[in-house]
Image: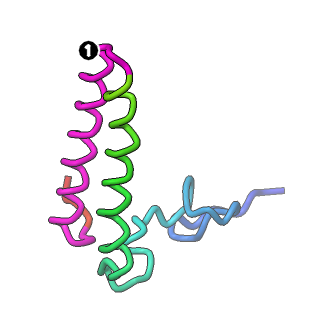
Amino acid sequence: MTEPSQDPSAPSPSGNGVGPGGNNQTPAKANGNGKVSLADKIIAPIAFLMFAAFLAFPVYFIEAVDLWIVIVVVVVMAGVDFYQALKSNGKLSKG
């Protein structure tokens, strides 16, 4: 018996959209129109601020400079990624 060839554009058998044959679309592009919804524009900054506030507690209560450095670097990296995502307005990057 021969196995049927798998169409690369077909959804994955698991239905999660990841892996061979998955659509691999970003959540902003998943609705098909390529625009970020208003809910995403409101929830994303709140989530980033909550993330930063969550990581502020160890910085405030634990007096370890190396931990502070790691947390600051992580928050800055997340902030840069968040800014780039806002700037792209849901468009996929070309690189």
Instruction: Using the image as rendered, state which of residue 61 and residue 7 is in the foreground.
Output: 61
Instruction: Using the image as rendered, state which of residue 42 and residue 8 is in the foreground.
Output: 42
Q: For the residue marked with disc 1, what is the amino acid?
A: Val
In the drawing, does residue 95 fall left or right of residue 40? left
Q: Position of residue 50 (x, y in %)?
A: 38, 53
Q: Position of residue 23 (x, y in %)?
A: 49, 66
Q: Position of residue 30 (x, y in %)?
A: 44, 75
> Residue at horizontal 32%, vertical 54%?
48
Q: Position of residue 65 (x, y in %)?
A: 26, 14
On screen, 71 above or below 7? above
Residue to which mark 1 is pinned: 65
On screen, 59 above or below 75? above
> Residue at horizontal 27%, vertical 23%?
68
> Residue at horizontal 18%, vertical 57%?
83
Q: Magenta includes 21?
A: no
Magenta residues span 62-91
Dominant secondary structure (helix, strand or loop) of the stretch shown in magenta: helix
